[in-house]
Amino acid sequence: MSLWRRMQIPLIAGAVYCVVRAIGPTLRYEVLGWHHVEQVYARHQRCIWTFWHRAIFGILWWGRNHGVVVLHSANFDGRWAGEVAQWMGYGVAHGSTTRGGLRGLVVMEQRLQEGLDVAFTVDGPRGPRFVAKPGPVMLARSSGSPVLAFYVGLQRARTFQKAWDHFQLPLPFSRAVMLIAPPIYVSADADRETVERKHEELQRELDRLREIGDAWFTMPEEERRRHRAEFGSSEFTNRPKP
């Protein structure tokens, strides 16, 4: 990486951080399915969080300051994004679900053993969009920790259609809904066929959460009540969970 590119990293990271700090406090979240997370913690386990790259803004703000370790690539975009994540109170493991992926998974497993949650932008760092990579399921098998799919849908946001991930930037004072699916466990002796089935299950959960989240603020109230009953009790908050 050239000197000029290295000099750009803190500048871009600083600009992005300022935007997150300006918009984040204005957002209000409805959280559905948090009891799934509490069940994992009650078993003295940690979570392997998975989400689509497009939802990273709403997730970055909501989960701040709890030391969740996020896998970032070592390329230019991954470097400045990692800076922002660290400033927001996340840990960073360098690697990706493509090049350097196995090294990244080893670091993530170590962090789970240290009592920290870990997280993947599961279609990152460069897509294909909405296609889950196998890293989280592989990590679940080796670590014993479950995978949790989740998504943040936004009431008002700008969608960058030309970006590979269709990134969404929430507008100030937007409402948001966070949907959390039940945990997916993978046994340590799972064979290749079982791992593939678990990966397909993760893909289905992520797709379903995105479908519900993107339609949340336009669907009839009766349908929202049905989903609230399905996911469990909800709460409204702007603060990260413990």
Image (cartoon, rainbow, N blue to C red):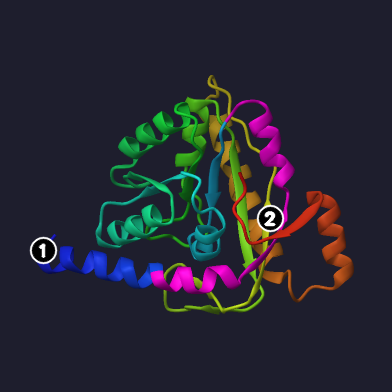
How busy is the neighbourhood of tag 2: few (under 14 within 10 Å), some, or many (20 plus)?
many
Return the disc, 1 or 2, that comes first in the chain's sequence.
Answer: 1
* Quarter of the figure that contains the N terminus: bottom left
Query: Residue 152's x, y, as percent?
Result: 62, 62
> What stretch of residues is rendered in magenta?
18-45
Q: Front-most of 113 and 238?
A: 238
Identify the residue at the far left of this view: 3
Eyeballing the image, is 227 above or below 25? above
User: Which residue is under mark 1?
Assistant: 2
* Quarter of the figure that contains the C terminus: top right
Query: Residue 196's x, y, as percent?
Result: 54, 37
**Element under label 1?**
loop
**Element under label 2?**
strand
Disc number at residue 179? Answer: 2
Q: Residue at x 47, y 78 (%)?
A: 160
Confirm whether the magenta stretch covers residue 239. Answer: no
Q: Amino acid at mark 2?
A: Leu
- Label 1 to label 2: alpha-carbon separation: 41 Å
* 24 left or right, relative to 220: left
Q: Amino acid at mark 1?
A: Ser
Query: Residue 149's x, y, as percent?
Result: 61, 48
Q: Residue at x 46, y 69 (%)?
A: 20
Confirm whether the magenta stretch covers residue 30. Answer: yes
